[in-house]
């Protein structure tokens, strides 16, 4: 066999091997049990932190009621326009399907469609306190959960921008949603700079999370 024929033969073998690897890589994720929701591996997520920011809330009523949140100017606003926007950050476990075949050019995690990870952690309680008295019955450090409504966005429960009384929402024991905002609804005793501490209690491994906001000056109606 000539050197040219030997080279052509080897090249054909290389191309054949690559073709086999490509087909094997695709077949590794061709079965429904590999590419379904979870693929038998239980896609899930675990909360490790709640990030937050002070915001000003605006309500749109067309074509449906929807709440928008924007940055606060000058760190002051009317009390019922104040909201604490919160987003849970998560560690993902088995968020993408792990290929069952070890002989694959492309892991199934990339060949299969990505399935958004979910958390099954349930909100057991939410407590909100302030560094100053909100009124005579609520001194600094008192639980202010009934001073707030909670705005929730969670595609799993088909909630695009739902607004609930915070105390009632806690009693439902829902899973931790994708986005949360706490909207102040009760009139404070007077104008002042308030700092709020928010604590979350879940049935997850960590169980307790919290943060303290920066001060925001709350104005009474007609004083802006």
Image: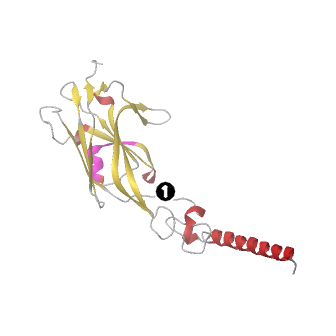
Quick check: 188 above or below 40?
A: above
Quick check: 47 above or below 140?
A: below
In front of the other: 104 or 182: 104
The quadrant where residue 130 appears:
top left
Q: Residue furthest bottom?
A: 1
The quadrant where residue 21 appears:
bottom right
**The C terminus sits in image quarter:** top left
Q: Position of residue 205 (x, y in %)?
A: 29, 61
Residue at point 32% right, 57% down?
122
Report the side of 13 relative to 204 (left or right). right
Q: Residue furthest right?
A: 2
Magenta includes 74?
no
Quick check: 75 above or below 100?
A: above
Counting labels gives: 1
Q: Secondary structure at mark 1?
A: loop
Residue at point 54% right, 74% down?
100
Report the side of 103 relative to 154 (left or right). right
The residue where tag 1 is placed is: 116
Magenta segment range? 162-171
The main secondary structure of the magenta stretch is helix
Q: Position of residue 41 (x, y in %)?
A: 46, 69
Q: Position of residue 47 (x, y in %)?
A: 35, 55
Label 1 packing within 10 angstroms: few (<14), some (14-19), many (20+)? few
């Amino acid at each position: 066999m000539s050197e040219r024929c030997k080279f052509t033969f080897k090249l054909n073998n290389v191309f054949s091997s690559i073709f086999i690897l490509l087909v094997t890589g695709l077949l590794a994720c061709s079965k429904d049990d590999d590419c379904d929701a979870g693929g038998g591996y239980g896609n899930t997520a675990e909360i490790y932190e709640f990030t937050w920011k002070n915001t000003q809330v605006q309500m749109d009523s067309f074509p449906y009621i929807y709440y928008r949140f924007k940055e606060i100017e000058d760190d002051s606003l009317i009390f019922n326009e104040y909201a604490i926007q919160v987003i849970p950050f998560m560690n993902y476990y088995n968020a993408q399907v792990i290929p069952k075949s070890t002989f694959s050019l492309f892991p199934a995690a990339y060949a299969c469609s990505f399935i958004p990870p979910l958390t099954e952690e349930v909100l057991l309680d939410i407590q909100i306190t302030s560094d100053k008295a909100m009124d005579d019955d609520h001194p600094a450090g008192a639980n202010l959960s009934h001073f707030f409504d909670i705005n929730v966005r969670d595609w799993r429960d088909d909630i695009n921008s739902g607004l609930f009384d915070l105390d009632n929402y806690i009693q439902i024991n829902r899973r931790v949603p994708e986005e949360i905002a706490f909207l102040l609804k009760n009139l404070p005793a007077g104008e002042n700079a308030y700092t709020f501490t928010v604590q979350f209690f879940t049935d997850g491994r960590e169980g307790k999370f919290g943060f303290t906001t920066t001060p925001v000056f709350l104005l009474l109606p007609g004083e802006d």
